[in-house]
Amino acid sequence: MDQLTRNQSILGKYIPAPAVPLIAEWIYHFDFKLKIKKSRQSRYGDYRPPVRGTNHLITVNNDLNQYAFLLTLVHEIAHLLCFQRHGNNVKAHGHEWKQAYKELMRPFMRLEIFPHDVRAAIIGYMQNPGASTCSDDNLMRVLKRYDANNDLVHLETLPMYAEFIYNERSFIKGPRVRTRFQCKEKLSSAVYFFAALAEVKAVS
C-alpha cells in the first residue's frame, strides 16, 4: 500500500468521504505531517511550522465529528498556506489567513459534503472567519447536532442551578454574566466563569 492510499484510508475514518481525495492530495502537496490527538479542552487543532528541517505539523483532536474535524483541519492548513506565503510577518488570524481559509474551503463547498444546516452555518461563518469554529456560536450549535457523544451538552442548555461535570469536577450553574455563566465548584465553592457553549456532562 503506497503512502497516498494509506493517507486516504486513515482520513476516511475522520472526514466525509467526498473530502478524502483532496485532503490526501494536500498532505502530499503541502508536505505536512498530520497527527490525530486525544481530546484537548483548550483546542481542537493546531499548526506548527517546520523547525530544523522537520515537516509542517498539524494536529487535530480525534473526538470531533466528521464535519468539525474537516473544518478544523482546513483551518490549520490555512495557517500552513499563510506561513508559506508570508512567513511570520502577518497576524495569526488576520486578513491573509482569512483569505487562505476561504480559498481552501471553496472546493468543499462545491461538493455534496455538508448537511443543509451545517452548510448554511459555514456560509455565515465564512463571512468573517475567526480564530476557531468555537468563535461562531451558531456554527458550534449546529456542529454539536452531529456529535456521536451524547453524554455532553452545551452549558447554556442546562437550567439554572443545575449540577454538571467538567474536567471530572462538579459545578453548579449560576447566572449569566454577559457572555459567560458564573458557576461554583461544589468541592471548593470557588467561582468560575464558563462559556455558554462549554461542553459539560449533566448530573441527573
Image: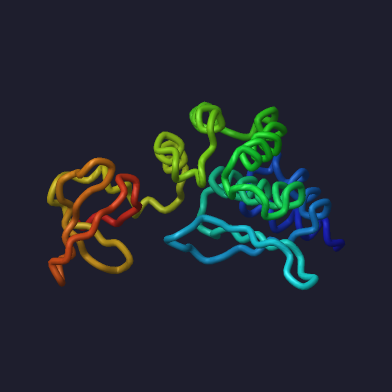
Residue 171, horizontal then vertical, whole percent: 20, 61
Q: Quadrant of the C terminus?
A: bottom left
Residue located farthest toward the front when viewing the structure as drawn: 89
Taking the spot 44% from the left edge, 36% from the top edge, the residue there is 142
Residue 9, horizontal then vertical, whole percent: 73, 56
Taking the spot 83% from the left edge, 51% from the top edge, the residue there is 29
Q: How is the image coloured?
A: rainbow
Q: Toward the viewer: 143 or 50? A: 50
Q: Is residue 12 left or right of residue 39?
A: right
Taking the spot 70% from the left edge, 38% from the top edge, the residue there is 104
Q: Is residue 193 left or right of residue 42?
A: left
Residue 87, horizontal then vertical, whole percent: 72, 53
Residue 58, horizontal then vertical, whole percent: 65, 59
- In the displayed structure, 153 sits above or below 119; it is below
Q: Toward the viewer: 197 or 94? A: 94
Q: Toward the viewer: 47 or 107? A: 47
Q: Is residue 111 left or right of residue 128?
A: right
Taking the spot 65% from the left edge, 62% from the top edge, the residue there is 48
- In the displayed structure, 120 sits above or below 139; it is above
What is the quadrant of residue 202 in the picture? bottom left
Q: Quadrant of the N terminus?
A: bottom right
Q: Toward the viewer: 123 or 92? A: 92
What is the quadrant of residue 166 in the picture? bottom left
Residue located farthest toward the right when viewing the structure as drawn: 2
- Total marks shown come to 0
Q: Is residue 158 left or right of residue 149?
A: left
